[in-house]
Amino acid sequence: MEKNEILVVYGDNPFDMAITIAEDADLATLIGDRKKYIGLKPNLVSPHPAKEGATTHPEIAAGLITYLKKNGFFNIVILEGSWTGASTLSAFSACGYKVLAKETGVKLIDTKTDVYENIDCHGMTIEICRSVLSLDFMINLPVLKGHCQTRLTCALKNNKGVISDREKRRFHSIGLHKPIAHLNTKIRNDFIVVDGICGDPDYEEGGNPVYGGRIFAARDPVLCDAWAASLMGLKIEEVPYIGLAERLGVGISGPATAREINKNSDAPLPPLPSGKTKQLSAGITANKACSACYAGLIFALSRLDKTKRDSLGKVYIGQGFRGSKGSLGVGACTAGFSSSCPGCPPTGAEILDFLKRI
Ligand code: SF4
């Protein structure tokens, strides 16, 4: 498989689809030495099964592990760290990876409990977990889905799972796009398999999965994300970290040569964002808000009727409001507001309960 290629496979069986895409890409040749230490990095942002549209189908990892073992690669691990406030171990369990590890003998690494190293990422020092730095080959397994702050999350943003929670908070405090781009100057993206089976096109924590019936592979994370953005009807400029990563030399955004392995005229249309998240975010004033906090607020607002939402006025959220005064805020950072939902981050249910009482 060439660096400018995107391979697409359609279907309903992620296990078989993953094997097909690995065979077509000749993944074994791309890896080379059978002794290499290989890491699979799924997106397990929170403990919700893949059918809800937020996390990577474990069948894709299972298909790739089967392929790798058949081709003589046995030095394999799965690494992930869920978002701030969520337990990776719960996500491993709820998303089917604990069972997968038991069945395949592949070790699970919770990057939240790893040792971290301060690494220079093209002029920005970032705290990265040691396990990912020791990999010889990394297979990135993102979900094609929307994100309430960055519009899209795919390969580049998925790598945020290998930094500490403290670093995740700092990423938000300095604007997500630039640190995501810098992080990818150091993290390997040797092979990428995107889960486009049923991602939620609006919201990174899922809840409204839209059937997409495809997975696709790439070797360049910038090309991958540029192509993913176009699938979701977004311009590259609407997802600034793609262009920033390209300018830092992480990859090239195009043109891509897309090849459909099992061309299918009945293939479902790619999922398009509904715009609902954008509508809900109009009622929020955010300044350096962490993903888990912001997504929890979006979830809570989506559960309120419009009259109630309008009655709230603006809701403030984010690290930029630490020490500030105001009327209505969410998260410990707005503790100085006259009404503030406690927690760091508060869950969506806690925020909903709090807003209902306002
Ligand atoms: S309260 Fe929310 S925005 Fe503030 S640090 Fe905690 S998670 Fe981040």
Image (cartoon, grey):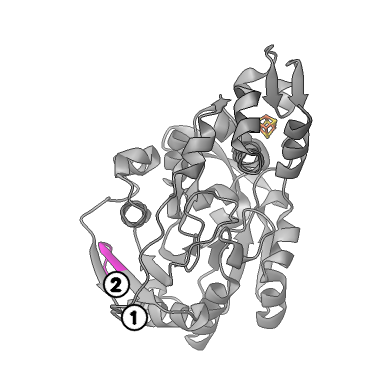
Q: Nearer the viewer, residue 3 or 125?
A: 3
Q: Where is residue 241 in the image (x, y as percent from the top left)?
A: 39, 40
Mark 1, ligand 1, within 8 Å: the answer is no
The disc labelled 1 sits on which kind of residue?
A: Asp
> Is 3 contained in the magenta span?
yes
The residue under label 1 is 24
Q: In this view, does 321 lie to the left or right of 191?
A: right
Mark sitting on residue 69: none
Q: Is residue 158 placed above or below 263 in the rendered structure?
A: above
Q: Nearer the viewer, residue 175 or 307?
A: 307
The residue under label 2 is 1
Region rendered in magenta: 1-6
Q: Is residue 275 placed above or below 4 in the rendered structure?
A: above
- Picture quadrant where residue 337 is located: top right
Q: Is residue 295 left or right of residue 176?
A: right
Q: In which quarter of the image is ligand 1?
A: top right
Q: Residue furthest top?
A: 325
Q: Is residue 100 placed above or below 324 in the rendered structure?
A: below
Looking at the rendered image, the quarter that the C terminus falls into is: top right
Looking at the rendered image, the quarter that the N terminus falls into is: bottom left
Check contact, mark 1 vs mark 2: CB within 8 A: yes
Q: Where is residue 17 in the image (x, y as percent from the top left)?
A: 44, 80
Q: Nearer the viewer, residue 200 or 73?
A: 200
Q: Which residue is drawn at 57% across and 56% down?
A: 132
Mark 2, ligand 1, within 8 Å: the answer is no
User: Element type at marker 1?
Assistant: helix
The disc labelled 2 sits on which kind of residue?
A: Met
Within-10-Å neighbours for mark 2: few <14, some 14–19, many 20+: some
Q: In this view, does 68 lie to the left or right of 224?
A: right
Within-10-Å neighbours for mark 1: few <14, some 14–19, many 20+: some
